[in-house]
Image: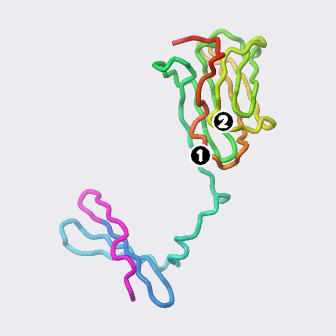
Amino acid sequence: MKLLTPLLFIFAADSAVGFTSISSSSSQRRCTSLLRSGNDDGVVSIDVSDLGLTIADLEKKIPTQNFSLESSGYQSTSRLPDVDDEGCYWVENPEDIDVTLRIPGLRGQPAEALNVLFSTTTTSITAFGRIVWSTIQMGISDTDDCSFLSLDGEDGIPIVQLNVRKRDLDERWGGFILQVGEDSILRFS
């Protein structure tokens, strides 16, 4: 048996150090892990060959249709650089991004009076037909497949929920708001 790589990685956790090596024979490659005690009392070998994995299996590209990665975070809805109101909570999936907006400047506006206008790169919120808040999005959306819902929220701040379908599927935006629009008439701290 020929050793391909004597040491693939080392990690330290408390008193243990772990080693992983990759070995090869003429018929099959296999992985073996070793765990050595920090005080050199002995070496424990863990043979993972019973899992039936080969190096070729580990080198295969993982198909993305078998699982989905989701990321989420908070962003400020204010144009003021020193204000972080965390009024935008987003959850990103490979196909779309779900956004919940609680914009303090909309306090007192009835949820029924709010509307959302979608374009490929911007989203605007209107109150009684007038644009009161807008944003440049982190990516390009498919406007034919975007939707919203407005609800009455706590403290008189309406909640606006958006579902924004991405034009380029599997593209990661890493957030929703690139920049709050300059046409926003709301100024709040």
* Left or right: where 48 falls relative to 109: left
Q: Is residue 171 visible?
A: yes
| Marker disc for residue 98 | 2
Callout 2 amino acid:
Asp
Could you tell me the amino acid type at mark 1? Glu
Q: Distance between the residues labelled 1 and 2?
A: 11 Å
Residue beneath the point at 78% across and 35% down: 143
Q: What stretch is highlighted in magenta?
A: 1-17
Residue 150 occupies quadrant: top right
| For marks 1 and 2 on the same chain, the one whose residue lies earlier in the sequence | 1
Say if the magenta span includes residue 22: no
In the figure, residue 102 lies in which quadrant? top right
Using the image, determine if residue 41 lies above or below residue 16.
below
Mark 1 lies on residue: 70
| Residue closest to the eye, 175 or 53 | 175
The count of marks equals 2
Vertical placement of residue 15 versus 180, above or below: below
Q: Which residue lies furthest to the front in this view?
A: 182
Question: Residue at point 37% right, 82% down?
Answer: 3
Is 108 positioned to the left or the right of 24 in the image? right
At a point 76% along the width and 20% down the height, the residue shown is: 115
> Judging from the image, what secondary structure is the residue with disc 1 in?
loop
> Can residue 156 be spotted in the picture?
no
